[in-house]
Each structure stands twice: as C-alpha cells, then as structure tokens.
Image (cartoon, helix red, strand yellow):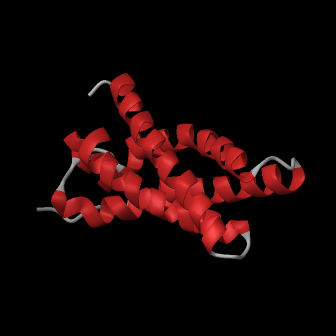
Amino acid sequence: MNTFIRWGKFNLVGAMGMIVQLGSLALLNRWAAGHYMFASAAALELTLLHNFVWHMHYTWRDRRDPTALPAQLLRFHLSNGLVSMLGNLALMRILVDEARLPLLVSNGIAILWCSVINFCLGNSWAFAVRTQAMEAGFGVRQR
C-alpha cells in the first residue's frame, strides 16, 4: 500500500482515537476525583486499545496475521504506547502546569505532537511485515 494512503488512514484512526481520548479524559477527570495525570493515563490506555483494533482492521489490514496478534499488540504498546504515554504525560505536565493551558487543549497538542513518531514506529515496527518484525526482535513464531 502507498505510504501516503496509509498515512491518511492512520490519521483517520488517530482522529477517532483523539475523540475517544478527549471524551474519556473529560469523563474520567469529572467522575474520578484525583489528579489529572491519572485520568490522562487511563484515557490514553483506552485510546491505545481502540486504535490498535482499528489499525489492525483498517490501516495495516494487509499486514494482519492472527497468529502474530499478541506480538503485534506488544510491539504496539512498546512503541506507540510508550511514545504516547511518555509524550502525553510530559507535555501535559508542561502545558497544564507551566503554560497554564486548559486540560483538553493541552491534551490535543500532546496527541498531535506524538502522532508523527507513532506512525513511523507503527509502519516500520509494530505492524511491520512479518519478516521485518522478526529481524527487529520481539518476533513471532514461525508457522
């Protein structure tokens, strides 16, 4: 598949994920009294799972392999998950506490910042063609 088309699909899934993340952040922040960082982390995990499913069935459907699902989920969390978690939480801390931007605006900025890195990692590692993924480690078992 053309990288430009895949990038468009990635961004469509990302836009849906952004709605999931912002909506769940708003709800969690309102319902669960506590620090916004905990609500941000929980909203992010919900979004990661949402995006993984959509990426498997839409963005990288040509690379879908049911026998590799656990390995792909692990690689997705280790790449997109870590970038999103660390990037979002670090940027949220700076934008909310230091820059005094509103919570949801800060989260939107953090999501956009992390999206380019996440696409590159998803395309080259998390959803890589099976032989590429095996060479890069966290391989899947041979059939």
Q: Quadrant of the N terminus?
A: top left
Q: Is residue 8 above or below residue 27?
A: above
Relative placement, left or right, of 55 versus 28 is: left
What's the residue at 46%, 48% (across, down)? 17
Camera sees residue 21: yes
Query: What is the residue that sits farthest to the bottom in this orientation?
Result: 33
- Spot occupied by residue 76 in the image (x, y as percentages of width and height): 41, 57
Q: Is residue 114 above or below residue 92?
A: above
What's the residue at 46%, 63% (across, down)? 46
What's the residue at 60%, 39% (across, down)? 112
Relative placement, left or right, of 140 versus 19 is: left
- Spot occupied by residue 111 in the image (x, y as percentages of width and height): 60, 45
Between residue 20 and residue 47, name the one nearer to us. 20
Quarter where residue 60 is shown: top left
Relative placement, left or right, of 70 versus 38 is: left
Q: Quadrant of the C terminus?
A: bottom left
Counting the numbered discs, the total is: 0
Q: Is residue 39 above or below residue 13?
A: below
Camera sees residue 138: no
- Spot occupied by residue 117 in the image (x, y as percentages of width and height): 55, 41
Between residue 18 and residue 61, name the one nearer to us. 18
Relative placement, left or right, of 110 versus 121 is: right
- Spot occupied by residue 104 in the image (x, y as percentages of width and height): 67, 49
